[in-house]
Structure formats: structure tokens, C-alpha cells
Amino acid sequence: MTTFQPSKELVLKNTRIGLGMLLLGIAMVVGGAVLAPRLPIAGVPVIVMGVLVLIGLTIVNPNDARVITLFGRYVGTIRTDGFHWVNPFTMRRKISLKAHNFDSSKLKVNDLNGNPIEIGAVVVWRVRDTVQAMFDVEDHVSYVAVQSESALRAIAATHPYDIVDQSHPSLRGSADIVNSELNQELHARLAIAGIEVLEARLSHLAYAPEIAGAMLQRQQAEAIIAARSRIVDGAVGMVKMALEHLDRDGVIHLDAERKASMVSNLLVVLCSERAATPIVNTGTLYS
């Protein structure tokens, strides 16, 4: 549904015309009041007409609009700010065209793996189509709130909290992808209400309190494993480099057993969490 512009007969959008109608209405009311005591038949209709002229005056502020209906039929929307005059028998309903922020509450949902998490989002929106926002939904503000939380639940249920494999984006590790999907979901849901989504992004993400401790231990364990793996890879490379240098420079010739002993000692020194304590061996390897 598109927003129809009001007809010229219905809305006079020139501010000077609005001021002129104001002065005309005041003059008619004053003139009718003066005329009524001496000639009621002429004075009273003039007063009534002056009141009707004044009733038709309406002010539209910047980034506001007036949706106009005449006897239950939509006839137009005033989007231009200023002083206007419309048919006095019409109803003028105000609707804001400003950008609005919706900050959702912390929702407790299950992610793709069934883990309970807390998630929240911020949605920036504004009315694009005043007719749809006014007539296609009961209350467009509450409609945005309900549909935003529903879309957030749907997005959270299709992603894991943390990275499981690189082929599937996670809520914590793929914020740009998740925010983009949330924007698309909201656009589809809010189109019926004539709402334009300017921005939507996650504002809160955490494990639910009942599993937060266990998940923290798991993350710490994964971090320790990753760090130790990095240390072992580096130590193996250093040992390999040391043996190659010894063989290339002819510093010492080692048999397989001595090489194994050296590799073992070097790996212990390089991979140990504590500083190594050297021991001086005055004998031989075979004694």
C-alpha cells in the first residue's frame, strides 16, 4: 500500500493561506458576534462558519505527519511542516516520522546447540508508509517491539553461541553476519506496518547464569589447549633447527640414541611451564 498525497481541495499547504484562513475565521466570529444581537438570523450562521474555518486549521511540526480521514475514508497525508488548513469535518491523526530506538530486554533463549543464553538487541526504525503504520496494524510501536523480540529469538536459535566449526557462523564470533541476518529478518516482518529498519545490532550476549561457570571453565580449557599446542609446535621447530645446525656445521656427531636424548631434554626445557634446572653429567650416556 502506498501513501497517497492529499488533494489540493482538501489541504492548502501554503502557510500564507493558513494564516489567511486564521484571520478570516477570527473576523467571521467577531463579525457574527457583533451582528447577532441585531440580526440573529445572519449573525449565528456567520459565527458557525467562522468556527468551522478555525477548526480546519492544523499545525504540522518537522518530522511529523497528519493522516487525514473523512467520514471513515482515507483521503491523504500531510508530510510538509507548517501551518495548514483542511476540511474541518476531517479527522487528523498525528504520526511521528522521527527515528526511534527500541532496546529489547535481555531475552533468555536456547542457541543452536541447546545452550541457554541471554541476548538483547537495539533496533533503530522509523515510519516509511504512514497509511500502513496507521491502518494495517493496531499499534505500530508495540508491533515493532513484539516483532523485534520474535526476530531476535529466531536468529539466536539458528546459530551457536561460540564457534564450533568455521563453516557455521556463531553469535559471538560472527557479529557482522548475525547483525545482517537480523536486519533482513526485521525488514521482512515490519514491512506490513510500513516500518523502515535503519539499523539492528546485538547489544547483549552472554551465557545464562546457570551454565556460565561451566562454560567459562570450558573456554579456559580450550585456551590452555590452544596455547600448549602453539608451544609444542614452536618447540619441535626449534629442536629440528638445532639438530640441523649441529649436523650441517659438524659441531658434534650424534647417534640415534643421543639424538633422542637431546630431543627429549630440549622439549622438556622448551615446553615446561617452569624454568629448567640444569644438571651437570660427569659420566657418559651409557654409564
Image: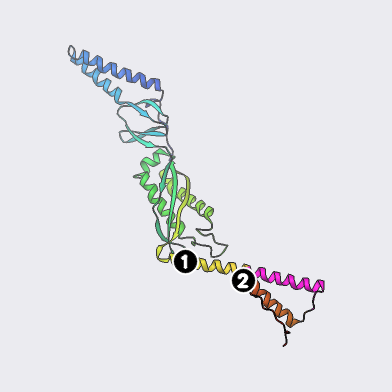
Q: Quadrant of the N terminus?
A: top left
What is the magenta segment's predominant secondary structure? helix
Residue 164 % position (x, y): 53, 65
How many badges with numbers are in the image?
2
Of 268 and 79, nearer the camera is 268
**Which residue type carries mark 1?**
Met
Magenta highlight range = 231-253
Asked if residue 249 is among those painted magenta in the image, a careful observer would answer yes
Left or right of 264 in this view: 189: left
Q: Residue at x 31, y 36 (%)?
A: 72
Residue 239 visible in the shown view = yes
Label of residue 275 in the image: 2
* Rendering quarter of residue 168: bottom right
Q: Which amino acid does label 2 sit on?
A: Ala
Residue 188 in the image: above or below residue 287: above
Q: In which quarter of the image is the C terminus?
A: bottom right
Asked which quadrant contains residue 246, the reply is bottom right
The answer to whether 14 is drawn above or below residue 67 in the figure is above
Label ID, residue 215: 1
